[in-house]
Amino acid sequence: GAVVSQHPSWVICKSGTSVKIECRSLDFQATTMFWYRQFPKQSLMLMATSNEGSKATYEQGVEKDKFLINHASLTLSTLTVTSAHPEDSSFYICSARHPTGRNTEAFFGQGTRLTVV
Amino acid sequence: GDSVTQMEGPVTLSEEAFLTINCTYTATGYPSLFWYVQYPGEGLQLLLKATKADDKGSNKGFEATYRKETTSFHLEKGSVQVSDSAVYFCALRGAGGTSYGKLTFGQGTILTVHP
């Protein structure tokens, strides 16, 4: 199947700093990528839909100035957590939709564990 | 809005035991239904899917049938192995309107299989 790579796998940062997470589709071009957040023992919650060449679409309740999404190319989307605080500590996962039809499968990265201290 | 409810875990079984993980959903229209698996340290992988009522998805010995009358998509396997230990997520993809294309996940069920 198609491969989506996420980097880094884990990161620890100090409160108040910003952290960038990359999501790459390695063997296909993805016009649409999705960013999810997973709290311990809870479901994955969709944060935003990232569209190549245009602004991301954020879900209700997600702060767009806090979670900056850039989808500058067909193989790369980035999520930047700005001025991170301990409550931003979470598991962030991206997925990319393979462009082979209307009901296409989404492929997931391995996730990034963010810990803000 | 769309929602998915999974049975709470963790689920602990002995090797070769029968597995059922319940999943029910709420959605408008006719969503597609999925089971994803997440092995330790890895991303989510699609395990199986069903796109219309009465469809049965199957893969690696796992099965799930799309039951519209009971709005369910329960995951089953007749004989689990230690290598099946993972977190299992039930998910749906909306059929139309604002929910099209977005995946809504259940909370995940941790499965541990002992030798």
Image (spheres, grey):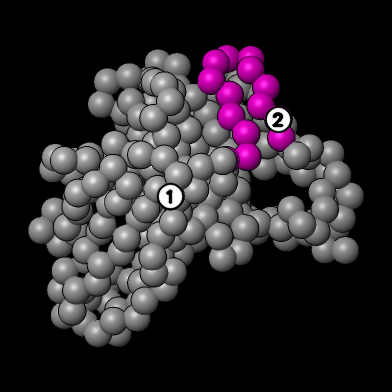
Label count reads 2
Q: What secondary structure is found at the residue carrying circle 1?
A: loop
Q: Which residues are magenta?
A: B46-59
State the mark number for residue B58: 2
Q: Count neighbours of disc 1 (C-alpha within 10 A) and say few if under 14, some if 14 to 19, many if 20 or more.
A: few
Residue B63 seen from this side: yes
The front one of B85 and B46 is: B46
User: Disc 2 marks which amino acid?
Assistant: Ser
Q: Do dots 2 and 1 share one subunit?
A: no
Quadrant assignment for the C terminus of chain B: bottom right
Up/down of A40 relative to A42, above or below? below
State the mark number for residue B35: none
Observer-side mark, 2 or 1, equals 1
Residue B85, position in %: x, y? 71, 58
For residue A113, which quarter of the picture? bottom left
User: Disc 1 marks which amino acid?
Assistant: Leu
For residue A33, which quarter of the picture? top left
Q: Residue at x 40, y 48 (%)?
A: A25
Q: Residue at x 36, y 76 (%)?
A: A11
Q: Residue at x 22, y 39 (%)?
A: A51
Q: Is residue B73 left or right of residue A86?
A: right
Q: Count neighbours of disc 2 (C-alpha within 10 A) and say few if under 14, some if 14 to 19, many if 20 or more.
A: some
Real-space Cα separation, disc 2 to disc 1, in angstroms: 27 Å
Q: Which residue is mark 1?
A: A26
The chain that hosts pointer 2 is: B
Residue at the extreme left: A65
